Image (spheres, rainbow, N blue to C red):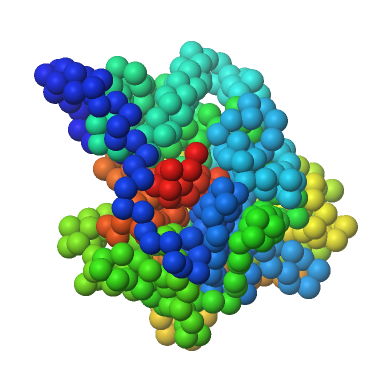
Amino acid sequence: MLRKPFTLRSVLIFLLAAFLALGLGACTTKNLPASKADYDVIVIGAGMGGLSAAAHLAVKGQKVLVLEKHHKVGGSTSNFRRGEFVFDTALHEMAGGGPGRLDRGLYQLIKLTGVDQKVEFYEVPHLYRSCFPGVDITLPTNWAGFKGALKKQWPEEAEGIETFHTLCRSVYGEMLELKDLFRYGGTRAKLTQIMVPLRQPNFFKWKDRTVRDLMDHCFKNEEIKAVVSQLWVYYGAPIEKQTALVMLAATETYLSDGAWHVKGTSQALSDGYAARIHELGGVVKTGTLVKKIVLENGRATGVATSDGQTYTARYVVANTDPYQLAYTLIGKENMPAAYLEKLEKMKPANSLFGVYLGLNVDLKAQGQEDSEILYNTSLDSRKNYDAMMKGDFRNGAAAITIYSNLGDSVYAPPGKSVVKLDAYSDISIWPKDPAAYARMKEQKVDELIALAANAIPALKDPKNIVFKEGYTPRTLERYTMNRGGVVYGFELTLDQWQKVPNTTPVENVFITSNWTQAWHGVGSCQLNGWRAARLILDREGIQ
Ligand SMILES: Cc1cc2nc3c(=O)[nH]c(=O)nc-3n(C[C@H](O)[C@H](O)[C@H](O)COP(=O)(O)OP(=O)(O)OC[C@H]3O[C@@H](n4cnc5c(N)ncnc54)[C@H](O)[C@@H]3O)c2cc1C
């Protein structure tokens, strides 16, 4: 998206050239792929990115085929049942995906597809309860409540709290002004970029700063800094490395647009997308692994699947990581060396380790009102991060989600509870040997439960736990095929927060996933899907 700052001279030259050429570079329709194909677009993978891309294409009349290797759609956005308990695979809370509030951003995109008619969203009761040594605070999901709770605990930080709010609002607003930049070609893109320091000054300033810089700018007290930056655990890097942009944008979205969940688990959102794609004449085929993108003269003509089928299409969208796309699906020999070098230089973020728990006690009845508890052993995010990545979960942090407190009866029967614990993890600490892996998993599951028991005392008594199942980076890698089981794509650091674009070196192949420009998360991956769809529609000259 954005590259370097620009000199005044280059700004003036561009301004002159650009006024003459403005608009000419946008939405090119040249080099359209040949139209004799089974489908207009084949989407590989039915995670949020793939489903969203397919729905946006289908609603504009494109004939789409979605191929998913798993027996159901959703990728990370899925669910599973164990006896009387239902578990949401991933989603804790989604930023800005629901109706009401400001009706902007993601929800407008969902409405464009018609998926809003198939899915019911509800707001989660609180944004999060944050526990640190000596601090325990629950923060509401709106600015007035959020600021009020912080000011009550740290009245001397009132000015900084207002500064933080103003920055979140202005930076996110400026990012929305740039939301179509990815569609602009040549001159128009360059002109938009060079105008950024003037038109989007807050975004321009904060794009080169970390969350730590942001906290130091707004606050003096280390406790409030830790509490306000708490959601670093959702974004995939300690605050010293993490770009401030993600914290500013996501906090504004959560507090102005709401934090949302899906009635019937996040699988209902995935199923809603699949149903809508069918309704629009598209095909969603599960249980189908794509092995190869077929190329002719440097262009994709379709895909080959593991069951020996070949499907042809004018465009291909991969809802995969860029490594599978480059090395396996397209093939290293067909990729420019520079693209591969860039991929290898960029650093993927962490994966996760966690535990799904079914309890025979009603946590709400015991006074546990929260649904999202973030438990930290240190105020220092770096210490928490390093401990988790080494596998020392007792000295890290845990995201504890009490799903049965969300007000949806799907999770557990009356009198029982469903809880999930998530911590950062690195695939390299998990042994490949099956017996050693099983031993370590069992031990780490108990360590993570012991950590979470500091926030939920009922977990101290094993008799309360009637079901427990751990997952590791290896589980996530197996299910999603993301390298290293990484769930955040590339680490959101200053030098790589732009991730990779939704275009690829193969002209009619696009990528949409955790690893691409609109970032990771259930909401952002839908945005990535829209972006990939939009690029294809622009080429086709479809508004
Ligand atoms: C435990 C956990 C908790 C999370 N919590 C939250 C949260 O609270 N809020 C939030 O916003 N986000 C959360 N996330 C992140 C969010 O779920 C992901 O960012 C998002 O769902 C990823 O979507 P994706 O488009 O990258 O696709 P993925 O979910 O990675 O799915 C990719 C799909 O493609 C399929 N596929 C891959 N290769 C092939 C192939 N060759 N052939 C056929 N199919 C293929 C896979 O089977 C998979 O179904 C969480 C993730 C995890 C794992």
The image shows residue 170 at horizontal and vertical percentages of: 45, 21
Q: Nearer the viewer, residue 246 or 281?
A: 281
Q: Residue at x 38, y 69 (%)?
A: 301
Residue 150 visible in the picture? yes
Task: Answer above or below: position of 66 versus 436.
Answer: above
Q: Which residue is outermost to the right?
A: 414
Q: Quadrant of residue 153?
A: top right
Q: Nearer the viewer, residue 270 or 285?
A: 285
Q: Quadrant of residue 220?
A: top left
Q: Nearer the viewer, residue 253 or 461?
A: 253
Task: Answer above or below: position of 181 versus 51.
Answer: above
Task: Answer above or below: position of 248 versus 30.
Answer: above
| Left or right: residue 114 compared with residue 205 | right
| Left or right: residue 56 compared with residue 197 | right
Q: How many marks?
A: 0
Q: Quadrant of residue 68?
A: bottom right
Residue 350 visible in the picture? no
Q: Residue at x 48, y 43 (%)?
A: 542
